[in-house]
Image: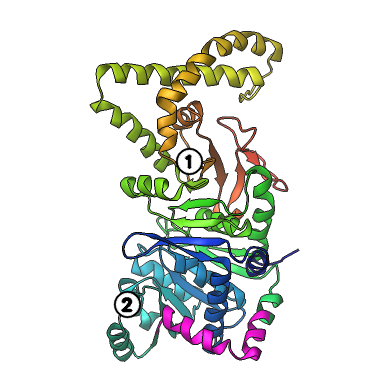
Amino acid sequence: MYKTIPQIFTNIVKTYPGYSVQMSKDKSGVFQSVSYSQLYSDVNALAASLSHRGMKRGDTVGLISDNRSEWLLSDLAILTLGAADVPRGRDAMPYEISFILGITEASFCFVENAVQLRKVLNLKDKLPALKHFVVMDREFTSESLAAATITEGVEVLLLEGLLSEGHQLLNDSSVAQSIEDERLKGKADETATIIFTSGTTGEPKGVVLSHANFTYQLEALPKVITSLAPGQKWLSVLPVWHSFERILQYVIVSQASTIAYSKPLGSILIADLSLVNPHWMGSVPRIWEAVKSGVFNSMKAKSPVSKTLFAFFVSVAKHYNNNRDLLVGEVATFKKHIRFLDIVKSFLPTALLFPLYKLGDHLVYGKVKQKLGKNFIAGVSGGGSLSESVDMFFSSIGIKLLDGYGLTESAPVVAVRNLNHGIKRTVSPLVGTEVKIVD
């Protein structure tokens, strides 16, 4: 049993070294892949450089960045050394950053780009413990680096430079062994991260999560989200500093699958779905609402006949699926009823509508499903309530959405809809999770 996220990652690397763990776009917009062995090598190199500069077990490290491949690299390196990160998105206000980095006494801070660097440097007088800055952006110039260092009198480092230095350090076998020793020292109850709330109703509140909080999720989620397999691709569009996207990325890594980085923007998202052909996508309800709206809006320019056919087959899909669900007993019921009557009531409508449903799949539903790529299994929806109309629409046309419920304090999943026997309007508690409804 592996006790920490870095230990789980290392085990996957040993088994699937050549599999792709990340896909991100280069300057020309073409997806480039990074293998598990490549990422592992870079994680060790970054950990070696950070250790060389004094990062140690128990430290807290700021991580101010949106979702990008370097985020996971930085996170794994920090956790490898037994430190904990304090993540935040680049839209965080200065007073929020000042508060969360100050109260956690962060000594290192990773920032995404020059804008974030300047934002945090301007707070330096309020953050006496903060001594080292690491800039992720490869476009950050050496001239900017020199100016920041001279002006502020702090150590500002480039992530790329730390990687180069770290690979050199690892040529010393004693350094390489020290990194491995730190990874093996990790314990389940050690703090992995401190995630702060937005602070919209007062000062941000920090949620302390241990490695055990995350590793429990990695054991429990595959029992509900079945069909996970090595080599599958996930399209990643959410802010990773939120616990939902973070656990998704840990699930992906623990299953030897691939994170393909995209953006929650209509044109980019749709294009990347076709390019990547993902098996899964985690998203918030508003993304699925936007996809549904896009489908209906696209019909406005169609001919009256096309509009009529579309409306007809969407109605067929809704009625067919409602009756089919009733027939097989996959309906949310909240009072006693006679199961036999459900079967009698739904059998004939299901049988009569089935041919029309198959025709609709050929003429209408299939074209919608094609936009998600040829490998799509299901979407995982969290971070808010999935509306019944959106849930019904996608379920009716044959696109599975696994609605989930959780909160940051539970790291974060409490319950999620079962992939194979999911019932609309319901979720299933994770094995080992106790759920109680209270007033």
Camera sees residue 67: no
Q: Is residue 112 visible?
A: yes
Is the residue 247 above or below the residue 13 in the image? above
What residue lies at 61% left-to-right and 58% top-to-bottom? 256
Nearest the viewer among 90 and 257 is 257
The colour scheme used to paint the residues is rainbow
Q: Which residue is mark 2?
A: 140
Q: Which quarter of the rendering shows the C terminus?
A: top right
For disc 2, the neighbor class at 10 Å (few under 14, some 14 to 19, many from 20) is: some
Is 283 displayed left or right of 81 in the figure?
Answer: left
What is the number of the mark on residue 374?
1
Residue 289, image quadrant: top left
Main SS class of the magenta portion in the image: helix
Instruction: First in sequence, mark 1 or 2: give its number.
Output: 2
Which residue does the image show at 33% across and 35% down from the upper left? 294
Examine the rendered structure and indicate whether residue 43 appears above or below residue 5: below
Q: Is residue 2 left or right of residue 263?
A: right
From this view, report whether residue 151 is shown above or below residue 251. Answer: below
Residue 389, x across and y down, in percent? 44, 28
Q: Position of residue 243 (x, y in %)?
A: 53, 57
Residue 179 lies in the magenta stretch: yes
Residue segment shown in magenta: 157-180
Q: Is residue 45 above or below residue 288?
A: below
Q: Residue furthest front?
A: 18
- The three-letter amino acid code for the residue at tag 1 is Lys
- Give yes or no for contact between labels 1 and 2 (Cβ–Cβ under 8 Å): no
At horizontal 57% and vertical 56% (from top left) the residue drawn is 257
Q: Residue 306 shows which numbered tag?
A: none
Q: Label 1's element?
A: loop
Percent from the top left, x then y, of residue 91? 35, 62
Of residue 36 and residue 416, the one placed in the foreground of this image is 36
Amino acid type at image mark 2: Phe
